[in-house]
Image (cartoon, rainbow, N blue to C red):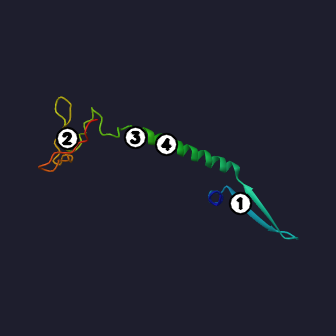
Amino acid sequence: MRNLLALAAAGLIGFAGIGWYLGWYRFHTEPTATGRQIQIDLNTPKIKDDVSRGREKLRDFLSDDDSTSNASPNGPTPNSPVTPAGFQRPSDGNPVNNDPFPPFQAVPPSGSSPKLPSPR
């Protein structure tokens, strides 16, 4: 419960700080005969404008991110002129691995055969 209250307080303080920095509101104090008068002026057109611009920027960011990530995460497409290092593409189109460091393959120790579980 304390964590939720701390999160709410941090959100409120962050919103208040960002709003003050962006000019969404202003505080005015004036002395009166009985004390002080405090006024808060909200600039609602500026708030609406900033929120709509933020939404547009977020929408543009998300749409640009989706359009630039059309490349295959597993490597180049079959018709791509780019060939990964260590591979060559012969005329039939199937890649051939010419990597000087082939993947590791486990070899059983010499003089003994691997122990496999017996079928049931």
Labelled pair 3, 2 in contact (Cβ < 8 Å): no
| Residue under numbered circle 2 | 87
Separation (CA) of disc 1 from disc 3: 43 Å
Query: Quick one: label 1 or label 3, which is nearer the N terminus?
Result: 1
User: Crowding at label 3, few (<14), some or many (≥20) Cα neighbours within 10 Å?
Assistant: few
User: Crowding at label 2, few (<14), some or many (≥20) Cα neighbours within 10 Å?
Assistant: few
Separation (CA) of disc 1 from disc 4: 33 Å
Give amino acid for label 3.
Ser
Q: Secondary structure at mark 2?
A: strand
| Residue under numbered circle 3 | 69
Labelled pair 1, 4 in contact (Cβ < 8 Å): no
| Residue under numbered circle 1 | 26
Q: How many marks?
A: 4
Give amino acid for label 2.
Phe
Q: Position of residue 64 (x, y in %)?
A: 45, 41
Q: Is residue 14 visible?
A: no
Depth-wise, is mark 3 or mark 2 nearer the camera?
2
Up/down of 79 relative to 41, above or below: above
Labelled pair 1, 3 in contact (Cβ < 8 Å): no
